[in-house]
Image (cartoon, coloured by chain):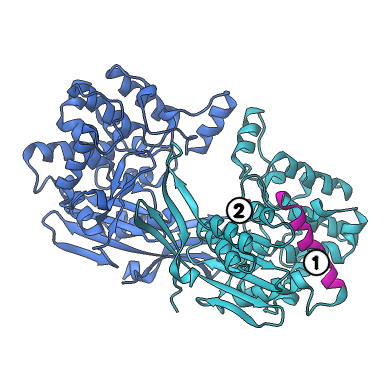
Chain colours: A cyan, B blue
Amino acid sequence: MTNPVLVEVLRGGIVESAHRGAVAVFDAAGRSVLEIGDVEQPVFPRSAVKAIQALPLVESGAADAYGFGNKELALACASHGGEPVHVDLAAAMLARAGLDGGALECGSHWPSHQDSTLALARAGGAPNDLHNNCSGKHSGFLCTCRHLGIGHRGYVAAGHRSQEMVRDAMQGVTGAAHEQANSGIDGCSIPTYAVPLKNLAVGFAKMLTGQGFSPSRAAAARRLTAACMAEPFYVAGTGRADTRLMQTAPGRIFVKIGAEGVYCAGVPELGFGIALKAGDGGERAAEVMVASVLGRLLEGDEALSKRLSGMARTPILNRRGVEVGVARPAEALLA
Amino acid sequence: MTNPVLVEVLRGGIVESAHRGAVAVFDAAGRSVLEIGDVEQPVFPRSAVKAIQALPLVESGAADAYGFGNKELALACASHGGEPVHVDLAAAMLARAGLDGGALECGSHWPSHQDSTLALARAGGAPNDLHNNCSGKHSGFLCTCRHLGIGHRGYVAAGHRSQEMVRDAMQGVTGAAHEQANSGIDGCSIPTYAVPLKNLAVGFAKMLTGQGFSPSRAAAARRLTAACMAEPFYVAGTGRADTRLMQTAPGRIFVKIGAEGVYCAGVPELGFGIALKAGDGGERAAEVMVASVLGRLLEGDEALSKRLSGMARTPILNRRGVEVGVARPAEALLA
């Protein structure tokens, strides 16, 4: 099936570009709340499932052993901007386990937060693996290995115990098979598996409510998602959509972006999980989509719904800061 | 109509994202060579038409009066990376007309060439309008104003003589009406007008062959496009698709990217003009599309066609430089 246009990008009064996509909203029992486009199609969730991938960090006892609070757990679920506070906290997490940034195998890149890149360059610095947007997640993997006495070298490989634990958690939460045939390698070198949007939505309804989980998994899932909602700066950073969305209704909205236009999200008070993808991989479209869907789901709270719908309208500015266009939800997303 | 999928982005063996789009290839007489998707739909060509927008610079006599050669004319048609050599040449062009960067009204941004941004930051610098990817085009506008004795302040406005000349050139070359109703404001503050892909393709066939133009316009058009093909580094810069594509067959291929997934291009020896757009605005898709179409059109030269088709396959690397996927032409683009 051809997914509908969900986001239009206008310049002046003319649609310049358009993004198609699919949206799945389900509860933890698998009941459909909202389906747009093909919600059965497997998609790579990429970084949108970091909270699930962090379950072993909590469930193994590593998080408690190393004294991790909300900030550390939020960073373990983050695609952070590489701002100094993110980099320092990742290093501190590793230090608790007797490691440093040299143990990371995620690869390096300049901070995605531009001002941090400029500051690093001005100081004569260069990026290392701690600046990688995934360094918090990888620090979580390494801490889990250390706590369990597992050799950490090569922890990014599919056959390493670390990634087996992550895969088991992903399969348990989503109910989808994770096999070689539906796998790929993520930007940070760990395996990623294509999972239907519907399964991701049900999985995040479970993560946010604990329904359908064992008591210990329910507690770990709620602890991780609550940490993200409590410390949204550590999940993303300055100016980022995830941080702004979670800040707009503290504790009431969970969102996490993934590369190539994916979001996993949810509203605990409603018991709904959300998974969506812009089919062309456009991040700007996914941001409009998640804000718009949240606005729809929360229409019972008129003020909040209005704020969210406002955040679904992204102005396009020219190089002098004048608004010359807008990215906005298309009819099929609002109907 | 729904445009077909023209580019697939794979991770492992799985299509992770896909881009739809349209491609028009026509000759200067308006004969269709290749049409994929809706070639009648108006699109904002953005920076892809800078060579047309530079016609007044040559036709007014300003380029000759200020002694501009291929490098200056290529920069006037460029979306450059803000590398020092680009910035310096834009400043030198303005100096010939007795102006400096302060006359530019394009707005500023950090160089799109990352190493140049890092070097500028390390040197304690900050970007100005000369670093804007459009500074060469704007320097051309300003030089034209000075040569003709037109006051240059406000030269970016639709009602200024500078933009009237640009609009007249665009209408003359494309044969499409340029009116308030089909206009928007570009990132560099000048007007942009939505034009059907077909008209853009015919227009670039004319630009590259001179057919259908007056002798003086034909000479100006060939001089500008030849300058771009002779100095492709000045049209884009280090590592950029436009530069690499034009370098692969010097003087035989013209390409120019525009924001939001547009390309205008052509093959002078065949007399064909090309215009295409990825409907979602994806630049990576437009780059695959233009290389693939050029490979098809030039299949008479097997070695060159193979090189171009190879350039249509863009590896996706993880943060450790390992290839984990690829962006490649989809069936509908190859058939």
Question: Could you say which quadrant of the image residue B144 lies in?
Answer: top left
Q: Which mark is residue A222?
A: 1
**Residue B265 vertical placement versus B309 (above, below):** above
Residue A66 screen position, x and y as percent? 90, 53
On the picture, is A62 further left or further right than A187? right
Q: Residue furthest front?
A: A302
How many other residues sit within 10 Å of disc 1, few (<14), some (14-19) or many (≥20)? some
Q: Which comes sooner in the sequence, label 1 or label 2?
A: 1
* Residue at the image position 41 percent from the left and 62 percent from the top: A18
Direction right: furthest residue:
A65
What percent of the width, then of the height, locates residue B280? 42, 60
Q: Amino acid at mark 2?
A: Ala
Q: Main secondary structure of the magenta part?
A: helix
| Residue highlighted by disc 2 | A241
User: Of helix, strand and loop, which one carries label 2?
Assistant: helix
> Answer yes or no: do the residues labelled 1 and 2 have beta carbons within 8 Å?
no
